Image (cartoon, rainbow, N blue to C red):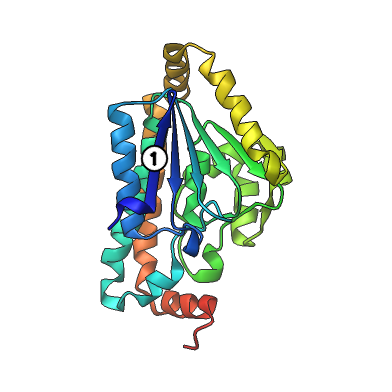
């Protein structure tokens, strides 16, 4: 069953959406993304005043589950990747399209394509000790989740290239300096920061917040991002069944080739 992989709680106009695969660090598999997109469809039909997006356990989300990928027979990996990356990108665009503010509550690592959930949010709070990292060049994948479609516009193409090509970890404090997050807190203070933002936003006019978000995401900007995400998907598929990618996954997982 997929319904427990994502939970949604609504209370006083605030929806809290939680990725709920903590035993695997909320890593992404098709069933989780199917549940996530179903939840986002429901939220789009009846939008809350605002959405808090988070993950259960110690990690926000560590991107695609490499072990699950490696367990897929080689001849089926392209089909698996089509659903996985397509589902991820659909969710990112759905977050952008929601007519309400989205707050990302980042309590742990953000790696791989899950960065897209952070990039699609309007406000991001991250704990000290959390970090962002790509891992693509170490595994053998092509970037997805907005690492090329969204990140360069946020921090510049040169800095985005350096982080990805060197597979460099971005600390919470560096992410704050880059403008990727708007608050960094001690773990015990994270929910207090979220609560402050929630109360501030609930005190604003919902129709004005929606108009502001709509103007920040005009059709031409959204179309540019959607095109970039589609390029990422196609490039990801072009690499997924290569022998080098298979070897890279096994090496990353510590499995002898």
Q: Is residue 100 above or below residue 187?
A: above
Q: Residues within 10 Å of mark 1 (few under 14, many from 20)?
A: some
**Which quarter of the rendering shows the N terminus?**
bottom left
Work out whether residue 112 or residue 45 is closer to the camera in this orientation and state it: 45
Which residue shows up at 40% across the image and 31% down it?
10
Work out whether residue 144 or residue 111 is closer to the camera in this orientation and state it: 111
Residue 93 in percent (x, y) is at: 38, 38
Q: Is residue 134 above or below residue 8?
A: below
Q: Residue furthest bottom?
A: 256
Which residue shows up at 29% across the image and 35% down it?
42
Q: Is residue 148 visible?
A: no
Quadrant in the picture for residue 237: bottom left
Q: Is residue 143 visible?
A: yes
Which residue shows up at 66% across the image and 57% down it?
169
**Disc 1, SS:** strand
Residue 178 in percent (x, y) is at: 68, 39
Residue 171 in percent (x, y) is at: 70, 51
Mark 1 highlights which residue?
A: 8
Q: How many marks?
A: 1
Left-right relation of 162 to 224: right
Residue 186 in percent (x, y) is at: 73, 44
Work out whether residue 58 or residue 219 is closer to the camera in this orientation and state it: 58
Left-right relation of 114 to 154: left
Q: Is residue 213 above or below residue 143?
A: above
Which residue shows up at 53% across the image and 42% down it?
118
Left-right relation of 215 to 57: left
């Amino acid at each position: 069953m997929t319904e427990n992989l994502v939970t949604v709680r609504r209370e006083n106009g605030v929806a809290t959406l939680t990725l709920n695969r903590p035993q695997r660090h909320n890593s992404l598999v098709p069933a989780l993304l199917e549940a996530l997109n179903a939840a986002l469809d429901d939220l789009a039909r009846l939008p809350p005043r605002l959405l808090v997006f988070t993950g259960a356990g110690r990690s926000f989300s560590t991107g695609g589950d490499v072990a699950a990928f490696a367990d897929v027979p080689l001849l089926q990996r392209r089909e698996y990747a089509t659903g996985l990356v397509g589902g991820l990108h659909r969710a990112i665009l759905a977050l952008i399209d929601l007519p309400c503010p989205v707050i990302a509550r980042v309590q742990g690592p953000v790696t791989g394509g899950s960065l897209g959930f952070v990039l699609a949010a309007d406000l991001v709070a991250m704990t000290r000790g959390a970090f962002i990292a790509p891992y693509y060049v170490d595994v053998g994948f092509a970037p997805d989740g907005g690492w090329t479609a969204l990140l360069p516009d946020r921090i510049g193409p040169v800095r985005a290239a350096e982080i990805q090509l060197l597979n460099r970890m971005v600390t919470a404090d560096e992410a704050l300096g880059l403008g990727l997050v708007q608050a960094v807190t001690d773990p015990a203070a994270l929910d207090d920061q979220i609560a402050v933002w929630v109360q501030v936003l609930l005190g604003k006019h919902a129709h004005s917040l929606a108009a502001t978000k709509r103007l920040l995401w005009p059709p031409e900007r959204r179309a540019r991002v959607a095109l970039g995400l589609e390029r990422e998907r196609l490039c990801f598929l072009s690499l997924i069944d290569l022998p080098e990618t298979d070897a890279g996954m096994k090496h990353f997982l510590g499995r002898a080739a």
